[in-house]
Amino acid sequence: GENVEQHPSTLSVQEGDSAVIKCTYSDSASNYFPWYKQELGKRPQLIIDIRSNVGEKKDQRIAVTLNKTAKHFSLHITETQPEDSAVYFCAASRITGGGNKLTFGTGTQLKVEL
Amino acid sequence: GAGVSQSPRYKVAKRGQDVALRCDPISGHVSLFWYQQALGQGPEFLTYFQNEAQLDKSGLPSDRFFAERPEGSVSTLKIQRTQQEDSAVYLCASSLAGQRAEAFFGQGTRLTVV
């Protein structure tokens, strides 16, 4: 089955700096890579996703890059703000006609310091 | 409703007790997933439904875990004879079928087995 590794486990940045979180996956058939943000005690919320037919996607301060050959993808947050502090999870899946079973990384605790 | 709803939010069970966790997905979402999230970890897949059919239950950790979705809408995850290692947050997610892959999560049920 799919295996997703995520680094670092914790990341502390100064407000305004950039943050980068990296993930690798094992199943070359995976074609969908979402990123979720989870605040303490709350539900995971999708912040951005990318499919295997593109190499990069950007949404305001958030961008994701995908390297299919190396089987890794990264989340980039620019101009970090205190409200970006949360746990971020990467995930991978193979989209089929039915379900979209996600395999998650172990999470990155991001702390944005004033 | 506007989002995925889970109940109860918190459940404390004595070891050996049976519990039932409810998930009310977004109306019209064909796919429904259950995940288990241990403290400090990413969600791990338990089982998947497409409408009322349980198409994948490979993640259920033991035969004490049982899930159903009899009318293709509300789902119940039942855990029999709870053990301490069952303590976790149980997350439900729903999505449209096919290529529209985004999964929307509920807030989860935090189960504590004492």
Image (spheres, rainbow, N blue to C red):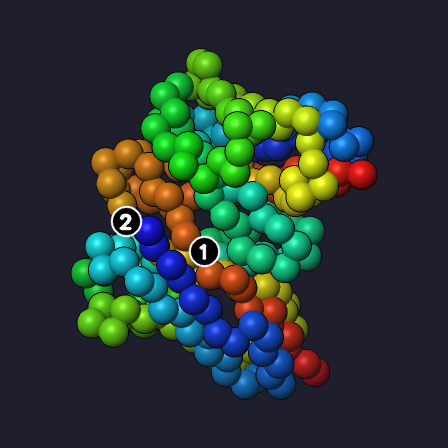
| Residue type marked 1 | Phe
The answer to whether B73 appears left or right of B65 in the picture is left
Which circle's residue, 1 or 2, is located before the other in the chain? 2
| Residue A94 circle label | 2
| Residue A104 circle label | 1
Of the pair B77 and B97, the residue shown nearer to us? B77
Callout 2 crowding tier (Cα within 10 Å): few <14, some 14–19, many ≥20: many
> What quarter of the picture does the C terminus of chain B occupy?
top right
Residue at 25% from the left image edge and 74% from the top image edge: A70
- Label 2: element kind: loop
Of the pair A43 and B12, the residue shown nearer to us? B12
Whether residue B9 is visible, yes or no, is: no
Q: Position of residue B18 (x, y in %)?
A: 69, 23
Q: Circles 1 and 2: CB distance less than 8 Å?
A: no
Instruction: Locate residue B64: give its quadrant.
Output: top right
Residue at 47% from the left image edge and 20% from the top image edge: B69
Of the pair A31 and A84, the residue shown nearer to us? A31
The answer to whether A66 appears left or right of A75 in the picture is left
- Label 1: element kind: strand
Q: Position of residue B9 (x, y in %)?
A: 70, 36
Residue at 63% from the left image edge and 59% from the top image edge: B40
The answer to whether B14 appears left or right of B45 in the picture is right
Q: Is residue A94 above or below residue A87?
A: above
> What quarter of the picture does the N terminus of chain B occupy?
top right
Q: Position of residue B73 (x, y in %)?
A: 46, 21
| Residue B36 circle label | none
Instruction: Locate residue A17: give its quadrant.
Output: bottom right
Read off the chain for label 1.
Answer: A
